[in-house]
Amino acid sequence: MTSLRSHETLAGSIARRTGVLFNEYQQDIYRRTDRLFAGLMAFQWLLGIAFALLVSPLTWEGAESRTHAHVWAAVLLGGVISIFPALLGWFRAGEPATRHVIAVAQMLMGALLIHLTGGRIETHFHVFGSLAFLAFYRDWRVLVPATIVVALDHFLRGMFWPQSVYGVVVASQWRWLEHSAWVAFEDLFLVVACLRSVGELRQTAERTATLEHEVRTRQDAENEARNANARNDAILDVALDCVVVVDAYGRIVQFNPAAEATFG
């Protein structure tokens, strides 16, 4: 019964340490990914301005081709989308709200870039790349608001301004479902990847906790042995009787002061 309780105590101790290490690993991933997106937001803002100056005049026609309107959209709207999540990613890294705000902002920036390029199909790849980047968090929950933003963006702009999202004046009212379905298809694999990655992270934490316990047990045993030897030496040093310790081969291995005084 005592052995069983000791085993349960040991298992509980390792489980608690595993939980602490797992949380530390997760927070480190969250903080590093938040700061990665903080830099990415600034880069995309500048990229949007470049698109407005160089690409928009070539992809929009007629009155919509006015460069200054797209530049203002890139500067102002891109700044509104990018600055707040970038600041959160730098100064509030690791907070749950930060990564969800970043997920929404990343998809809104993708929507802006799609608009600036006149709905070019190639720019839609930004959405799929952004989902892959968001998977760096190893938290499948950030994919949910990102997917909702993509679906709503394609639905609303496809209904009221299809040229901005699809590059055509008239588009099928169900076209947004096709785009959303491909996003959901990628989400499926990214969710599986996130869950597997989290499982591997927990296994790493458990192995580290077990190794730490083994090292600590070995150190405790070594300390106990040193303390036992020290106590034994202290007892022999003050003993009045002569004590001579020999090994199995008859060699003297210990000789206390009383024996030294008696035998010289």
Image: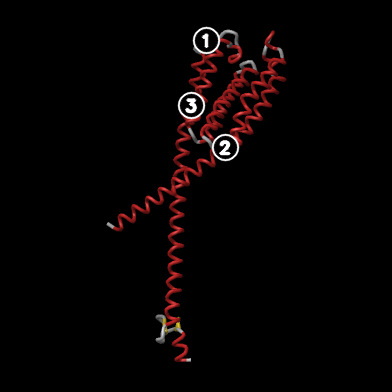
Q: Residue at x 40, y 80 (%)?
A: 248
Q: Which residue is mark 3?
A: 144
Mark 3–mark 2 Cα distance, whole angstroms, equals 20 Å
User: In the picture shown, does residue 179 fall above or below 191?
Assistant: above
User: In the picture shown, does residue 81 fall above or below 246?
Assistant: above
Q: Is residue 113 left or right of residue 252?
A: right
Residue 194 in picture, x, y percent from top left? 48, 35
Three-letter amino acid code of the residue under disc 1: Ser
Secondary structure found at label 1 = loop
Three-letter amino acid code of the residue under disc 2: Ala
Q: Residue at x 59, y 25 (%)?
A: 126
Quarter residue 66 falls in: top right
Q: Callout 3: 10 Å neighbours few (<14), some, many (20+)?
A: some
Q: Callout 1: 10 Å neighbours few (<14), some, many (20+)?
A: few
Secondary structure found at label 2 = loop
In this view, the mark in front (3 or 2) = 2
In this view, the mark in front (3 or 1) = 3
User: Of label 3 and label 1, which has the lower sequence position?
Assistant: 3
User: In the picture shown, does residue 47 fall above or below 3?
Assistant: above
Identify the disc placed on residue 93: 2
Give whichever of 139, 27 is nearer the camera: 27
User: In the picture shown, does residue 108 fall above or below 216?
Assistant: above
Secondary structure found at label 3 = helix
User: Of label 2 and label 1, which has the lower sequence position?
Assistant: 2
Q: Which residue is mark 1?
A: 172
Give whichever of 240, 181 is nearer the camera: 240
Quarter residue 113 falls in: top right
Residue 205 in picture, x, y percent from top left? 46, 47
Give whichever of 118, 83 is nearer the camera: 83
